[in-house]
Structure formats: structure tokens, C-alpha cells
Image (cartoon, rainbow, N blue to C red):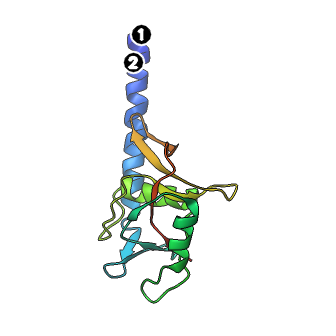
Amino acid sequence: MTHRTLLSCLFACMVIGSAAVSHGREEKGQLRSQGKEICQEVRSGKMWQVDKKSRFSSAREAERYAADLQLGGYGDWRLPTKAEMFNLARIFFWKKNTDCAMNMRGDFWLVDDRGKTSPGHWEIDYACGPQYRYIKAIQPKGHVRAVRP
């Protein structure tokens, strides 16, 4: 790599990085604690189960657990979509979770764009700007973090 190319890449990283940081300052907390068991997204109103439950070995078990969950007076819990879990992961990556603490490590049961339930997780890396990628679990095991509505 030439000296000029290296400097151009470094400059681009600085510009993108400072834009991302300044964007992050504009929106403070995006999650609000609703007690010890639930966090609520400020914009969408979606509620998230704080605890991640033990790993389930099948989609059926995970779906049943979410459907039977009674938490905070609500009984309409479900598995999140891939996009919903991405948004939650993004909130935690940018530290917009305010007083909501959740363990985001591991694979979680999600519903993909085709309606198929499988475990996986989002990886977010910040090399030269944020890079997001979905990693499907190797084994069919994952935690449940239910969402509503």
C-alpha cells in the first residue's frame, strides 16, 4: 500500500469515526428501564425481557417459552426478529442503553426474514466505521430474549 493510499484511508476513518461519534451524541438514551425485568425502547415502545433464559435446544422450545411468558403484567411476548435484535445490539454497541443492563453475549433465537426460527447473534465491529454482520449459530442452541408487542 502506498503512503498516499494509507493516508487517505486514515483520513477517511477519522472523518467517518467523528461523524459516527457526533451522531451518537445526538440521541442519548434509547432504552428505559421498566423495573428489573423489562427495558423499553423509547422510540418504538417495544419492551424487552432483561434476563436471557437458559439455552434452548429447539425452535419449538424457544417459541413455547416466549409465548407462555408472563412478565410485567403482559402475556403477548414473542421471539424477536433478526432486525429487532440488530437494533437492540446496535443500541448496546453505541452505549445508548442508559440504565438498562442486559447480557448480550451468546446466540439468541430469532425469526429471520422468511419466518424461520434459528439461533444466531449480531457482531458489530468498529474498524474504519461500524461494520455489522449476522452470525448464524453453529449448533441449534440459543438463549431467549423475548420482546413485545
Amino acid type at mark 1: Thr
Question: Eyeballing the image, is 26 above or below 147?
Answer: above
Question: Eyeballing the image, is 75 above or below 44?
Answer: below
* Residue at image coords 48%, 79%: 69
Query: How far across and down, in percent of the image, does residue 35 sit?
Result: 32, 82
* Residue at image coords 37%, 81%: 34
Which residue is label 1 attached to? 2
Q: Identify the residue at the far bottom of this view.
A: 73
Question: Eyeballing the image, is 30 above or below 21?
Answer: below
Query: How far across and down, in percent of the image, does residue 110 sit?
Result: 55, 59
In the rendered structure, find residue 6 and report the number of the disc placed on it.
2
Quarter holding the C terminus is bottom right
> Label 2's element?
helix
Amino acid type at mark 2: Leu
| Front residue of 123 and 128 | 123
Query: How far across and down, in percent of the image, does residue 96 sit?
Result: 36, 62
Any part of residue 148 in sight: no
